[in-house]
Image (cartoon, grey):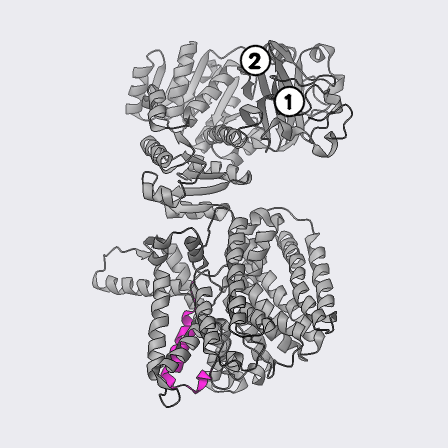
Amino acid sequence: MNIIIVGCGKVGFSLAEQLVREKHNITVMDPDEETLQRASDAMDIMTVSGSGSSAVDLRQAGADEADLMVAATSSDEVNMVCCLLSKNLGTRYTIARIRNPEYISSLADLRRNLNIDMVINPENSTAIEISRLLRFPAAANIETFCRGRVELIGFRLQEDDFLTDKPLRELDPRVKSLPLLFCAADRDGEVYIPNGNFIPRAGDQLYVAGQPAALDRFFILLGRYVSKAKKVFLVGGGKVSLYLAHILDKLGMQLKIVERDEARCRMISEKFPRAIVLCADGTDSELLESENLTSYDAFVALTDRDEDNLIISLYAMQRGIAKVITKCTRQNYAGIVRSLGLDSIVSPKFITASHILHMVRGLQNSKGSVMNSLHRIADGHAEAMDFTVGPSTRFLGVPLKDLHLKKGILLAAIVRGQEIIIPEGSTCLMENDRVVIIARGGGILDLNDIYDDEFSFSAPGSGPQ
Amino acid sequence: MNLLLVLKIVGRVLLFESLTLLPPLGVALWYGEDPMPFVSTFVLVAFLGAFLASLSAPPTFFAREGFCCVGMIWVLTGILGSLPFYLSGAVPSFVDCLFESFSGFTTTGGTVLPDVEILPQGVQFWRCFSHWLGGMGVLILATAVLPSLGEQSQYLARAETPGPFVLKLVPRQPRTSKILYAIYCVMTLVVILLLWAAGLPLYDAVVHAFSIAGTGGFSSKNASFAFYGNPAVDLIVSVFTLLFSLNFGLFYLALCRRFKEIWKSEELRFFLAVVTLSTVFIAWDLDPGHHQGILESLRYAFFHVTSVISTSGFFTEDYALWPQFSQMILVLLMFCGSCSNSTGGGIKCARVLILLRTLRRELHRLAHPRAVEVIKLDGRVVEDRAVRTVLAFLGCYMLILCAAGLIISLDGHSFSISFSSALSSLSNVGPGLELVGPTGNFSALSPLSKLVMSACMVIGRLEIFPILILLSPNAWRRT
């Protein structure tokens, strides 16, 4: 597809990187020549210097023939104008990044009148993700599928867990009887799709999928169950904090927010009268101690600087806070601190890129089976998707044991009506099922992409499609 | 530097290049000549390529690796490309073979052979075919057809395309390369047909069309286009050498019917102005007694101006006998060269324009020390970093020119011979002045000078840096 990305900031850049890898034709537009130079040095893309609010520049970038335009400049207003202009020039789909909370209430109107097909709000998405983790602190990360009926939870295996150093087939029968499935394991950046012989080791990030209730049971058996956080300590009062405070406040959690800027503090305290708002430097350990850090269930580091976030998170973890969540934009830092034990790392640009990738895949495959959601797990080394089985899907009614799936593909769960099925050899797919699929690498657009064509035509019992 | 991956990519490209030996092999078979020179070169290149391509390497690849790859590929291509000359026995000295091969691939077109008409047809074809391959670039061709180059393709193509700015027609490099080659092939085909229609034998038309397309200069005749003495042929050659020395991005714009943007190109306007002025001045300066009337003077002036500024080096007359003023203009044109992203060589008009504008800015700054002024080209700002790169390029160009001239002068020839040999090979023109002028050749020079000139040719074709980086210890360090 021909995709234009306007604004080559953090989100724009990582999005371009991702989409180039998926073999799309990317044109990046930015007013700053140096930014463009950096982008074109790193990726096989075309760059156009110009402003997103100029129709001439947009046409220069090819907006009249583009399939998709993503407006990701730092200004919401420019993004909206950019969508309007390129839609008028003939771009088929537009995505705007709109993140100012003031626009949220009128978002539906804005979208309709400005012809925006999708609005992304990285800060809000990040806040939602964090709130999910606070509700289920045992997980390092959680993805939900099929309206929350299936969850995929990642957690780090520890030395003394009963799973460690035993093949999965020899698990405790109490765990085995639970309807859940081990989907993926991330060992030092390498992703494995486990089978019965897989031996988990301490330090592995394991991903397990199933119904929320079954997952709760699993974590209780594992001795890791922690009920939802009640007192949350937030450092940093940026946009993510505001969105997060909004959600947590509604859930009735107790909040303490530390922010350096006084005017900002006043604004936050105005909005959330129940929260304790402190105007201070959140990276100062003395302050954290004097504010009784250890009495909190959860600590969330949301300042602008990755480095500050990581250091204070490590500090909080060392002080024994049960749940520590860190905002970290740089991918390479995430890997380093994970080895130090910080598991819950959220990255706004990463979350946003997943959302847009999902949309792009959907546009590419508008005829086949519908992809309902896409989440990238294990630092982007694997993807978890949820498809609705359509009439074009092949091999319906064929038992899974007779099918040849591509390497690195796993069916994690099937939702059929009210029932949630953890697939076995005898399970078969039926129309209107919703299927959760884990794929190592990526690039699955359609449910039919999971079959290995070299084998499946000779598979016993498989008729013509 | 990730040397293993560089070698692996070099191997893949070599493997691909071995295929380019098949057309001359076919020609040799058609004319009933000995096919062995091509067969053995083919086997050797394919074997070497397959060996290098089978290496396993870590995947890190950046601009530095890209430059090294391009440098190595070109040096190897030149050396391996000389084998058919040597093995056929037509050119006994290996240094001469190297010279011919580099002169071919870099589209220089200077020759050391006193008589090219005695060459076997297959070798003859290979000489001119190498012009065609080197004109648009072997790597651009490789990135167009080899999907396995994938992510690396942009670094390779960038290091090979001439000019201060990267040419990208569409977002993905492989597709850009395909479009470039499609335009190139179609235009070559048109030249073949026109030359054929103008009365050249088909074989001559093909061979010369390759030469014209690459703005090379090799001819299958000792007297180049003077052999035909046909004004129509002269006109076709002039017009097409001119077209091939334009920025290929403009042809793409024409295909997209964006004609307004074409005329906006300041490089194009500058180039055409230079061509027009030089033609007029030379026509005025040429001896009226020697040519019959101003029209004939214009014809010869236009032919040689286009031939030199496009850095081809065809001739219909020995311009070494022209008045000094005309010769000086031609020498200046050798410096200037064609437009960026064309098949021609030289400094490139875009760089000359940026240089002139920088000079203007510096002068302006003397008068107004606090003035802030940006340099623009085609209505876009040229960043200071790009300006610095251009100035560094020009500095390097002059230094290399001086060094090469110095070494060639060891042979004891006159200043204009030494200097014009160096300039002509660095700018990929071909002929120089006096003894090494259009009707002469470089056979009188020593082997050392020939090697230096071969090096200049490849340095000039790749615009200095890909070759210099191979010589820099920085590139070879692992860290």
Q: Secondary structure at mark 1?
A: loop
Q: Is residue B478 above or below residue B393?
A: above
Residue sitting at the far right:
A460
Q: Which residue is mark 1?
A: A157
The x, y position of residue B5, in whole percent, is 63, 51
In the depicted view, which residue is nearer to us: A359 or A113? A113
The x, y position of residue B427, in whole percent, is 47, 71
Q: Quadrant of the C terminus of chain A?
A: top right
Q: Is residue B456 left or right of residue A402?
A: left
In the depicted view, which residue is nearer to us: B88 or B476? B88
The x, y position of residue A240, in whole percent, is 40, 24
Q: In the rendered structure, which segment of residues is drawn in magenta?
A: B317-339
Whether residue A334 can be seen here: yes
User: Quadrant of the rendered structure where residue A108 is?
Assistant: top left
Whether residue A197 can be seen here: no
Dot 1 and dot 2 residues touching (CB under 8 Å)? no
Residue depicted at 54% across the width and 40% down the height: A23
Mark closer to the chain start, 1 or 2: 2
Q: Amino acid at mark 1?
A: Leu
In the depicted view, which residue is nearer to us: A261 or A95? A95
User: Quadrant of the rendered structure where residue B367 is?
Assistant: bottom left
Q: Is residue B113 magenta?
A: no
Q: Is residue B297 left or right of residue A359?
A: left
Q: Which residue is mark 2?
A: A149
> Do the residues at pointers 1 and 2 share their chain?
yes
Q: Is residue A427 above or below residue A65?
A: above
User: Can you tell which mark lies on residue A123?
Assistant: none
Residue sitting at the far left:
B367
Q: Is residue B319 magenta?
A: yes
Residue depicted at 53% across the width and 67% down the height: B193
User: Quadrant of the rendered structure where residue A448 is?
Assistant: top right
User: What is the chain identity of the residue bearing mark 1?
Assistant: A
